[in-house]
Amino acid sequence: MAKVLDGKPVVNALLKRMHEKVEHLREKGVTPTLCLLRIGEKTQDVAYEKSILKQCEAGGVDVVRIILPKNATQEMLDKKLMEANVDDSIHGILLFRPFPEQIDDEHTRELLNPDKDVDGCTVGSLSGIFTNTKIGFAPCTPQAIMEILHFYGIDIERKRAAVIGRSLVVGRPISAMLMHENATVVTCHTRTDGVDSITREADILVSATGRLNSITAAYTNPHQVIIDVGINWDEERGKIAGDVSYEEVEPLVNAITPVPGGVGTVTTCVLVEHVIDAAERAATGEEKPI
Amino acid sequence: MAKVLDGKPVVNALLKRMHEKVEHLREKGVTPTLCLLRIGEKTQDVAYEKSILKQCEAGGVDVVRIILPKNATQEMLDKKLMEANVDDSIHGILLFRPFPEQIDDEHTRELLNPDKDVDGCTVGSLSGIFTNTKIGFAPCTPQAIMEILHFYGIDIERKRAAVIGRSLVVGRPISAMLMHENATVVTCHTRTDGVDSITREADILVSATGRLNSITAAYTNPHQVIIDVGINWDEERGKIAGDVSYEEVEPLVNAITPVPGGVGTVTTCVLVEHVIDAAERAATGEEKPI
């Protein structure tokens, strides 16, 4: 039976760290503030926003919400974004994506002030991850994975890691971050043949396939640590589930993150910590990311 | 016996492509021009410069050389670099690195105008590689590898690739570039245990260990294509050699690049093509890299 890598104690440890930073900032008269920029009322966005609001409250971070109608134009969005970019009382900006189709994703991301890119979505922030320089913030999901691995004392150095997925939000940055901590990483994707034969040799398996029950026993080995990034709807059971066929796999591996209650739980907390860190950087006038 | 992936025919194909572009530019009154910025007279730098001059001449690219004394200060270098940055008659700038110890590498690289970063050494250029966006130029060595693979029609899609080395100049960018063409890539490094057991499973092996004879038969398989990035001095034989123990390995694999005459030969040519491309971008007023 696997050790379950529950996200809650990780969140509690992060909150403790965050509270100390926030206290310090409040002494300087700074209240870390996150600006949420949302277009329309998509169920998923509203649910995510709710969890962010809750986590911001727990972390001592204020929130400014800007909500545009679902048919908002690029110009409307650009204007609001540029206002938030230069507003010194706002330390971080979160753009709810994917945007509606009239909005240009790349254009909008690159308009975002990199100092306030707490979600790590600009090319500048990502370049910091890939080159392992201290530019910007990491995307929150891969950083949440690293927080979980660190919290539970899972060895990364000299281990083999397999990542399934090569998105800029999860797969590619987590591959880079694991390598920076001296794992040997293979990144699998939709054009990889025999993924199971690759992952079977991995000490750490990160799945970001986004497909329910796509990780079966054949992908695993008994000493493996599985990080399940998937958030899928299990129609049959009427509940949220990860990529891993949990009942089948859990008894066979060394450790596994649950879904829900695993990576996702920590991800929102990481976002909130980024806001605090951005406020710290602004307050101390630390050199800005290029 | 392996097919030898000779660099010369690749260079000839590149030169043909370059000549067409240069002709087009000359019709517009533009002569693509490379600025070489060298500090001191290190043997290696002078040798590299010589091969660049030769290749520039072959490619129809003018060269401006700026040579500073070996005890040049950061301020002297910055001044020269900034002049070249804004000089419209210069389309590309090559910094000879590693610099002498009084020069700050990161500071200097980031001072370089990214539009003129024909060697792909700024964080901006690298971020274009890692995110697979058309920002800046690729570092020349990994691009030379891709040119060789393409020229010889070597399949990349769905193949397994192993890269040994994780530098920002070779290992990490070539891993990203191979993945963008749908290879499944594992990047090995100094903290990887059992490198030979990993590379034995690879269809394509890229070695950038920088250690003579470090790739032996145990690292290979009969259908493998080996790209040898190493340029080492073989004391015993009194000649340049790669990372691969060539006499041992060559009879056992499918294809292999020679050293000298392989990747290095193509690399200089790629650099020269970047100057031409930078001149084209400047002439057409193409949107600048961010």
Image: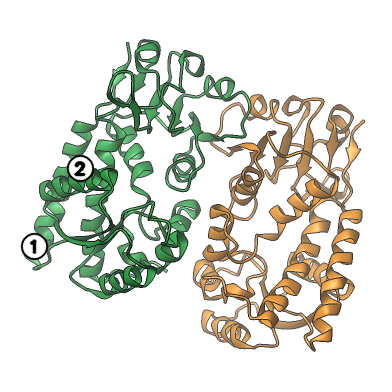
Chain colours: A green, B orange
Residue visible at 21% across and 73% down?
A88
Q: Quadrant of residue A197?
A: top right
SS at mark 2 in the image: helix
Q: Position of residue A164 (x, y in %)?
A: 50, 33
Whether residue B39 is visible to the viewer of this picture, yes or no, is: no
Chain at tag 2: A
Q: Position of residue B173 (x, y in %)?
A: 61, 51
Mark 2 is on which residue type? Leu
**What's the residue at 72%, 39% (across, down)?**
B156
> Looking at the image, is mark 2 or mark 1 earlier in the sequence?
2
- Residue in the image at 76% along x and 55% along y: B144
In terms of depth relative to the viewer, which is nearer, B115 or B230? B115
Q: Is residue B129 left or right of residue B234?
A: left
Q: Quadrant of the image for the C terminus of chain A?
A: bottom left
- Report whether B113 appears left or right of A244: right
Q: Which residue is mark 2?
A: A14
- Residue B155 to residue B97: above or below: above
Return the residue nearer the eye: A150 or A32: A32
Q: Is residue A153 above or below residue B18?
A: above
User: Which chain does the numbered disc 1 sit on?
Assistant: A
Q: Are marks 2 and 1 in contact (CB under 8 Å)?
A: no
Quarter holding the N terminus of chain A is top left
In the picture, residue B118 is in which quadrant? bottom right
Looking at the image, residue B277 sits to the left or right of residue A112; the answer is right
Residue A196 place in picture, x, y as percent: 55, 21
Residue A10 higher or lower than B280, as above or below: above
Q: Position of residue A108 (x, y in %)?
A: 40, 64
Q: Is residue B226 visible?
A: yes
Work out which residue is located at the far front of the displayed protein and give it: A71
Q: Residue at x 35, y 55 (%)?
A: A137
Q: In this figure, which residue is indicated by the disc labeled 1? A: A26
Q: Is residue A20 above or below residue A112?
A: above
